[in-house]
Amino acid sequence: MLHVLNGDSLASTFPASIPGRIAIVREALVDGPVQADSTEELWVIREKFLSKNYPEASQENYFAQVVPEFEKIMTATSGTEVYLWFEYDLFCQVNLWFTVHLLKKHKGPVYLVSPTTDLIEGFGGMKEIQLEQAYRNARLLDSNERHVLADMWKIYQKEDISEALTLSHQTMPETPYLYPAVVAWKESIAHGDYPGKPKAALKEIAAELGTDDFGKIFRAFHIKHAIYGYGDLQVKRLWEEMKSGELAQ
């Protein structure tokens, strides 16, 4: 068995009672460029973007900490049962799409493990016994669902929001979790003078709270707009971009 965990946070609380190896997705593909003609080219593009925009993250060498985890997924043997531990927010979904894309040629069974909590808490709000139960309740992905999720990655790379909306809407009975994430993606896109919903929401929250205290603003954003699933690093970057944009006006 191979358990693909979305982030180190879940890895730190993952029950030792669940058998199998672990691969940790240490990426935030929802943030920054993903257009590439090959996986190898994608690594280079992502490392460059992350080290430039998240200096604090560059201490962890991308090719030492991130790529080897993806290689565990890419080299899973046909006899390996793969369990994908991903939530339904946009951050997790984009990482899921890419992971299923990497598993496109995998002949073995692939399961999706979902949290039993809400979008705000996710796996982080679950106790060990609940994580064990989620594993037992894992749902086998059929070939069609795997195909749809892998296609979503290619669509995301093309930034074709229209095609994403169409596909996620058409497959809603089988993949009800897809459409809300795609709508969140659409609403995050800036157009004209509108900076996109996340930045607009941050400005609105700061005004409502009457503060520039990022900690308070982030907590409110995480609760009100849990569908994005952004971590504090992503929200901080959006906040700083918004603030610098206001100063430039």
Image: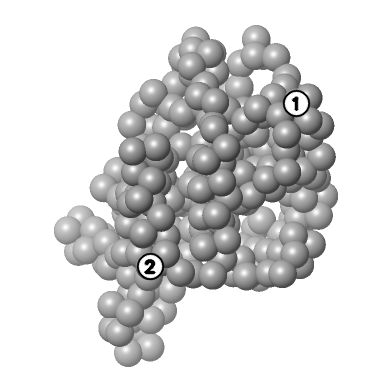
Q: Is residue 173 above or below residue 127?
A: below
Please indicate whether residue 133 sits to the left or right of residue 34 in the image.
Answer: left
Q: Badge 1 local density, few (<14 within 10 Å), some, or many (20+)? A: some
> Which amino acid, by three-letter code, is at mark 1?
Thr
Asked which secondary structure carries label 1, the reply is: loop
Is 120 located above or below residue 243 in the figure? above
At 33% from the left and 31% from the top, the residue drawn is: 118
Q: Quadrant of the C terminus?
A: bottom left
| Labels 2 & 1 near each other (Cβ < 8 A) | no
The residue most toward the bottom is 249
Q: Residue pushed farthest left?
A: 208
The residue lying toward the viewer, choosing from 136 and 26, is 136
Q: Position of residue 86 (x, y in %)?
A: 52, 36
Q: Residues within 10 Å of mark 2 (few under 14, many from 20)?
A: few
* Quadrant the N terminus occupies: top right
* Residue at 17%, 58% in the rendered image: 208
- Figure quadrant of residue 58: bottom right
Direction from residue 188 to residue 34 in the image, left or right? right
Q: Is residue 209 above or below residue 13?
A: below
- Which residue is disc 1 drawn over? 80
**Residue at the (36%, 26%) spot, across then down:** 117
Distance between the alpha carbons at the discs numbered 2 and 1: 35 Å
Q: Nearer the viewer, residue 78 or 230?
A: 78
User: Residue 174, percent across and down?
Assistant: 39, 37
The residue identified by callout 2 is 162
* Label 2 or label 1, whichever comes before in sequence order: 1
Q: Position of residue 60 (x, y in %)?
A: 75, 52
Q: How many marks?
A: 2
The residue at 41%/79% (across/down) is 244
* 35 lies above or below 208: below
**Amino acid type of the residue that numbered disc 2 sits on in the rendered structure:** Ser
